[in-house]
């Protein structure tokens, strides 16, 4: 294990809104890892605001990777988040081909929520994301995304333990060793499931549900998950740490900022990550 693991994180940079790279960089750094951004696009703010400006960087990603290869740059892990086109999804696969041999690959298939695909996502992109998931060691879909990856109808009805286990097993069959599903339907609890393919076992972790809607929760979760795994925590331990930190970030934002308009103020609890060691 490298003293400071270098993690390639591939997704957009939204200057305002606390999501994607503006979440990944500080959290991964706080956990004692080097976060190397490969920005697919730069936005003035994320798309939940009424107005935005966007610069697509897709055409430059290959030349960035070319330069890194010439400079003998390597990575100990690759993590991907929101991707805006089939081409960007394919570019993540190219990064895995170039830099990912025997390295940890974590895919957050950030493409849907609340039973619906994001507006720019098409059936073609779902197929491409399914293929990218097959290249990962760990995938971290929310429940909606898990349904789309499996071509399964979405429902807000509570799911049985047996049904959840079968969903995880079917996602594992796509290729990843570990499956972590977040936002499992419940009216009382926030629940995640962690599936280990080698043992065909599912463990769950639940906290009282905080009834707010906020952007960036998945990015915060994935950032902590990735940093913790690279510091030696098991996927199950890392997922629990990620959920606890995300939940506390939401609680503190509600108590001190009293608004989710500009995202979750995770900065207020960031020092807690500095205490984590393995």
Image (cartoon, rainbow, N blue to C red):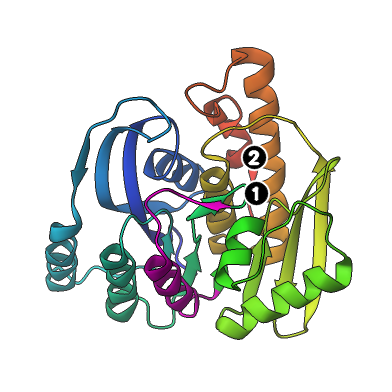
Q: Estimate the x, y position of residue 20 in percent, counting from the top left.
A: 42, 44
Q: Estimate the x, y position of residue 72 in percent, counting from the top left.
A: 19, 72
Instruction: From this view, report whether residue 278 is shown above or below residue 266.
Output: below
- Name the residue rendered at 27%, 51% in the picture: 39
Q: Identify the image quadrant of residue 155.
A: bottom right
Q: Which of the two residues, 276 or 39, is positioned nearer the viewer here? A: 39
In screen coordinates, is 142 left or right of 41?
A: right
Q: Identify the image quadrant of residue 13.
A: top left
- Label at residue 246: 2
Instruction: From this view, report whether residue 148 is shown above or below residue 103.
Output: above
Residue 189 part of the magenta-drawn span: no
- Name the residue rendered at 58%, 17% in the picture: 259
Bin the neighbour count of mark 1 within 10 Å (Cα to Cα): few under 14, some 14-19, many 20 and up: many
What element does badge 2 sit on? helix
- Name the residue rendered at 43%, 55% in the picture: 81
Q: Is residue 196 visible?
A: no
Q: Is residue 243 visible?
A: yes
- Label at residue 183: none
In screen coordinates, is 40 left or right of 181?
A: left
Report the span colored magenta.
116-137
Q: Estimate the x, y position of residue 146 in percent, counting from the top left.
A: 62, 65
Bin the neighbour count of mark 2 within 10 Å (Cα to Cα): few under 14, some 14-19, many 20 and up: many
Q: Estimate the x, y position of residue 194 in percent, counting from the top left.
A: 73, 66
In screen coordinates, is 248 left or right of 13?
A: right
Q: Which residue is mark 1?
A: 242
- Name the residue rendered at 47%, 48% in the picture: 28
Circle 1/circle 2 CB separation < 8 Å: yes
What element does badge 1 sit on? helix
Q: Which of the two residues, 156 or 142, is positioned nearer the viewer here? A: 156
Instruction: From this view, report whether residue 164 is shown above or below residue 120.
Output: below
């Amino acid at each position: 294990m490298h003293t400071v693991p270098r993690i390639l994180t591939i997704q957009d940079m939204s200057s305002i809104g606390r999501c994607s790279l503006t979440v990944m960089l500080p959290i991964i750094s706080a956990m004692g890892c080097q976060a190397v951004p490969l920005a697919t696009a730069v936005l003035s703010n994320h798309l939940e605001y009424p107005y935005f400006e966007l610069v697509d960087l897709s055409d430059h990603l290959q030349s960035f990777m070319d330069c890194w290869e010439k400079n003998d740059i390597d990575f100990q892990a690759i993590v991907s988040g929101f991707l805006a086109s089939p081409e960007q999804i394919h570019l993540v696969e190219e990064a895995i081909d170039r830099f990912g041999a025997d390295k940890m690959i974590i895919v957050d298939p950030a493409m849907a929520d609340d039973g619906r695909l994001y507006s720019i996502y098409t059936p073609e992109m779902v197929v491409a994301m399914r293929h990218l998931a097959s290249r990962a060691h760990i995938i971290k879909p929310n429940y909606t995304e898990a349904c789309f990856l499996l071509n399964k109808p979405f429902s807000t009805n509570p799911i049985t333990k047996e049904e959840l286990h079968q969903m995880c097993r079917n996602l594992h069959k796509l290729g990843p060793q570990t499956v972590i599903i977040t936002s499992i339907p419940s009216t009382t609890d926030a629940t995640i499931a962690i599936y280990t393919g080698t043992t065909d076992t599912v463990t769950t972790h639940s906290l009282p549900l905080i009834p707010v809607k906020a952007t960036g929760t998945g990015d915060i979760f994935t950032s902590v998950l990735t940093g913790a795994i690279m510091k030696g925590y098991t996927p199950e331990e890392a997922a629990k740490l990620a959920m606890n930190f995300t939940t506390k970030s939401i609680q503190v934002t509600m108590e001190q900022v009293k608004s989710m308009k500009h995202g979750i103020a995770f900065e207020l609890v960031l020092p807690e990550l500095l205490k984590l060691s393995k």
